[in-house]
Amino acid sequence: MKEPIIKFDNFGFQYDAQAEPTLKEINLEIYPGEKILIAGPSGCGKSTLTHCMNGLIPFAYSGESTGKLTIQGKEAKKLSIFEISRMVGTVLQDLDGQFIGLTVAEDIAFALENACVGQEDMKKTVKKVAEMVGIADHLEHAPDALSGGQKQRVSMAGVMVNEVNILLFDEPLANLDPATGKKAIEIIDQIQRETGATVIIIEHRLEDVLWRDVDRIVLMKDGRIVTDTSPDELLSTDVLLENGIREPLYLTALKYAGVKITPERKPRSIRSLTLTEGDKTLVRQWFHARKTKNEKKEGKALLKAEKIDFTYENGFHALKNINISIEEGELLAIVGTNGAGKSTFSKVVCGFEKQQVGMLTFQGQDMKNYSIKERADRIGYVMQNPNQMISKPMIFDEVAFGLRQRNVPEADIAVKVEEVLKICGLYPFRKWPVSALSFGQKKRVTIASILALDPQMIILDEPTAGQDYRHYTEIMEFLRELHERGITVVMITHDMHLMLEYAQRAIVFSGGRVIANDTSANILTNPEIIERANLKETSLYDLALLCGIGDPNVFVQHFIDYEEERRYDSVTGRQSGGEGALYYSKEEKRG
């Protein structure tokens, strides 16, 4: 019988700065060649567990451990960080903290240089792995000049050049567009099969990870392992939703239609799913019982972009003849490929960059002479990387910073800060230092700091990246409330779930141009747009085809409308039809 390559034996860990242990009584065995998905709500201990395996604990984060952890048969606390790094390779969630080289090629080659690999072999290896992750055209670029998704690929390549037996991926999909995320999962799967390495993935986007099979899903909550079982077994229960993780959309739709999910149906993937004719009939009946909503009438323009062109100093033509109208009180998604111009457009709107051609108007007024502060009074911007926004050591002070800059009375500041901290799920941490938070919690701090300023329009770059389903829902429901009060909300996102569930309209960027402006359902059922913009068909589309529904785009729209009704019912306390359980009660949403 094989010996485990990683073994936690009644293991616990408590940070020096914390009053309670973060990990409690962890018993986990991972075997050579296994592919494991570790999931759980924010703050459940996933990242701490990862840091124990890759040596960051105790070498970067100090604390006290109990029990025993062995890696390849050796007790971890007796190993140096160098010895652990020769066994475990890690792609961190905070990409900027992982880069070392001045160029992409240098960064990928770093481990090879440390191992004294010859120049010719080094160049061949770097080129090979760069091509595998789709970053070969950027080898001479500086890492900080890349988009979030491109940085993720460089980090993956840097791990792949190492011949380690264990590969850890900490939220590898967080900054990737859907098609690239799909490719990343395929690459991870390919590496695992070709090398036989043990692969451990920590990720919220469970449905995307399950695009390729995993052996087990380890679900954590409050520092403990809740369950450790196969995907088919886990997805046949309600344990995911009960613990703050979003289940695959096709399973939610099946439950709404009254189909009972069992392990025999192989629910781990839409590709493996087997349905009886009776199941398909139930789905068709649910679909035909739905009524199509009336189309929303066009509203008054708040922001208009006309013929916007922008080229960076290095000659990169990022925006090409952009014509966009964003309505007052709209909830809008901007989606597309990594590097397509989405973030550049938001920077131009906020005044961080200035277009060479074209005009921007806000409430009919030309913004050409607006300062960055004048724009910030009207338009709040939440960056993708929270570490690039945070400037204060304490959470309360960070959220209060903008209000203090505007000379708001301290009593009013206290009320406002506490209000947004509650909304963003951060109130229990209001007296904590920012450094004690996870990446996802830092993200919520930056959102809270902008929401505190009550802007007319808010632009959020990947607002839910790194968030578990509960915090995702809390943030998005608050953004929906803002929208219902007339605030315009624009979300730059790679999350197709978010786009489907919340966006009234989506604008698609590709190659610096706008290639689509339509409903989310129509966009995600259009093969041409999906291919051009590196999007991905929703599994609802595949479910509709599997059940013989001829209008998959209408099926997807019906699902969106039904979800919206259920969210409304959960707030008002009314009950709606269908067998899928409401995700959160009224009291849970408020808490």
Image (spheres, rainbow, N blue to C red):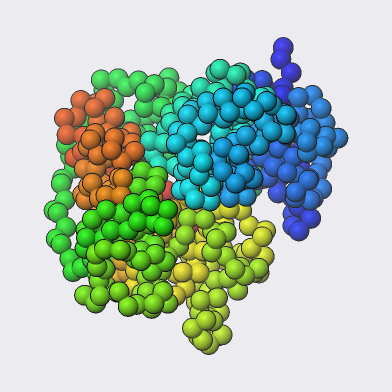
- The residue furthest right is 78
Task: Please report the residue visible at 64 percent of the width from the left and 45 percent of the height from the top.
Answer: 100
Q: Is residue 149 above or below residue 362?
A: above
- The residue furthest top is 1
Viewer-closest of 353 and 45: 353
Please state the horizontal and vertical placement of residue 178, each as a whole percent of the image. Answer: 39, 39
Q: Is residue 100 above or below residue 306?
A: above
Task: Please report the residue visible at 67 percent of the width from the left and 58 percent of the height from the top.
Answer: 436
Task: Please report the residue visible at 32 percent of the width from the left and 58 percent of the height from the top.
Answer: 310
Q: Image quadrant of residue 79? A: top right
In the picture, measured across the screen, residue 529 lies left or right of residue 162, that is left
In the picture, measured across the screen, residue 36 lies left or right of residue 536, that is right
Viewer-closest of 57 and 563: 57
Please state the horizontal and vertical placement of residue 403, each as a whole percent of the image. Answer: 50, 79
Please state the horizontal and vertical placement of residue 467, each as a whole percent of the image. Answer: 50, 50
Task: Please report the residue visible at 60 percent of the width from the left and 19 percent of the height from the top.
Answer: 195
Viewer-closest of 250 and 196: 196
